[in-house]
Image (cartoon, helix red, strand yellow):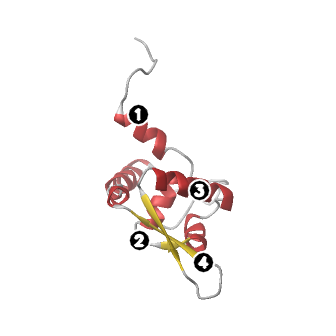
Amino acid sequence: MSTEHTGFCPIYRAIGVLQEKWVLHIVRALLSGEKGFNELARAVGGCNSATLTQRLEHLEQLSLIDKRTEDSHGKLARSVYSLTPAGLELQSVIDAIGHWAQLHLEVPGPQEHGAETAPC
């Protein structure tokens, strides 16, 4: 059986997009509503500005997020990000991951250093 991938497979492509580091964290943060860049950076946590900018640009190219610029009346313009209808459809993916995690992942104990814990 060959493991080489030939032809277009939408599942293969979707996994490629969604597995990029920070992508699902960005989507999850935007599911609660639009956010400015700094607010989004805080909500995602741990992602440097250059990487966040790159991921946001890629998600915008894929039509998963929209970016608009707000005039800040004399201050620097503020970029605001929101999910498109296609991005909002990822809610079911996030929900499925959450359901799977609750069933199959144990809560890390205090002795487990490096275990990622974040508020849900």
Q: Residues within 10 Å of mark 3 (few under 14, many from 20)?
A: few
For residue 67, say whether it is visible.
Answer: yes
Residue 35, x across and y down, in percent: 50, 73
Q: CA distance from mark 1 to mark 2?
A: 27 Å
Q: Earlier in the sequence, mark 1 or mark 2?
A: 1
As rendered, which of 113 and 37 lies closer to the eye?
Answer: 37
Q: Amino acid at mark 4?
A: Ala
Task: Please state which of the two labelled residues, at mark 4 or mark 2, is closer to the viewer.
Answer: 4
For this orientation, the residue located farthest to the top is: 1
Find residue 77 and name its label.
4
Q: Using the image, determine if residue 41 lies above or below residue 101.
A: below
Q: Earlier in the sequence, mark 4 or mark 3?
A: 4
Q: Earlier in the sequence, mark 2 or mark 3?
A: 2
In contact (CB < 8 Å): disc 4 and disc 2: no
Identify the residue under disc 2.
32
Q: Amino acid at mark 2?
A: Ser
Q: CA distance from mark 4 to mark 1?
A: 38 Å
